[in-house]
Image (spheres, grey):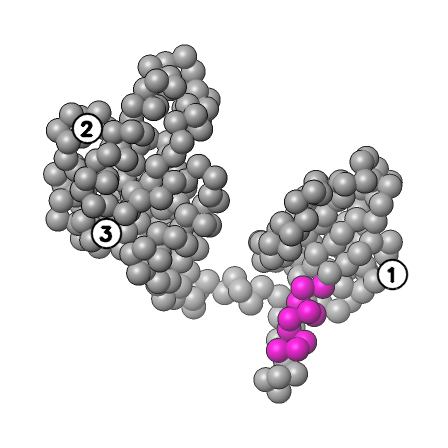
Amino acid sequence: MPENRRSVFFVSDGTGITAETLGMSLLAHFPGMTFRQTRMPFIDNVEKARACLPVIEQAAREDGARPILLTTLVNDEVRAIFDGFPCIELDLFKTFIVPLSQELGVPPTREVGQARRVEENALYRQRMAAVNYALEHDDGASDRHLEEADVILIGVSRCGKTPTTLYLAMQFGIKAANYPLIPEDFERGRLPGVLEQYRDKLVGLTIRPERLHAIRSERRPNSRYASLENCRSEVLHAETLMHREGIPWLDSTSKSVEEIAAKIMQIRGVTRRT
């Protein structure tokens, strides 16, 4: 394997999402490297930890280099299985939990899955309600209870509205609807009538026509809908309409869903729901 490639394992006694999210943020600082990523969730006992070792060893042989382990393991016995193993281990809990405990003067809990205690987590319940809301109001499927929306995204089909509304719901408990701009709207030169009274909730998304063409071609190849000419026309009309109507908008082409969501929250002054 080339020297600029390395295997990375996210090892956790929970879902592994925390390890992967923080780990990916760290790895992003090395753009010249290619990382082969593997998430190993629910490694909550010694037997499961030992079962990971052959997989990691195999990766080391294939790479010809030490694998990288990013771990979030609460149990000391489980964590000890990886001690002395030929890898570079970044213990994310130890890095942050120990200094926090020293500063607060309080010992941390040793129970696994503290972040997943959903039955008493108001934010979790709010997030699930927001997800249901986003699904109900996806692509203009319903205009019921639009007054409850924290934000309403508009833009042409396949510009990133749906994944953004779902991310806002899952991550922050924000109720987000999305509404497509279609040729009929461009012919009228106006926003869809149902959105007129919610202008203070609107944020537009746009996208480069070439990227839109590629996305639509995967879904409906060789169609008028996916043609580059039509994509250019729709994007131009949508941007013209949003500019004329005074709707703030941003280009989703080269932005991650995390960046798009953060910018939308900033534009509309929306914060995490609790």
Q: Amino acid at mark 1?
A: Gly
Is residue 3 within the magenta segment?
A: no
Task: Locate the N terminus and report the quarter of the image it occupies.
Answer: top right
Please give the residue where the numbered disc 3 appears in the rendered image. 201
Q: Secondary structure at mark 2?
A: helix
Q: Which residue is drawn at the image coordinates 70% and 70% (left, top)?
A: 94
Residue 38: x, y in percent? 68, 44
Give the number of the mark in front: 3 or 2.
2
Query: Is residue 219 found left or right of 203 in the rendered image?
Result: right
Q: Which residue is drawn at the image coordinates 68% and 49% (left, top)?
A: 30
Q: Secondary structure at mark 3?
A: helix
Where on the picture, by quarter, is residue 217?
top left
Residue 84 image label? 1
Q: Residues within 10 Å of mark 2 (few under 14, many from 20)?
A: some
Task: Locate the C terminus and report the quarter of the image it occupies.
Answer: bottom left
Q: Which residue is drawn at the image coordinates 38% and 40% (left, top)?
A: 251
Please give the residue where the numbered disc 2 appears in the rendered image. 186
Start-end of magenta stretch: 91-100
Q: Amino acid at mark 3?
A: Lys
Q: Earlier in the sequence, mark 3 or mark 1?
A: 1
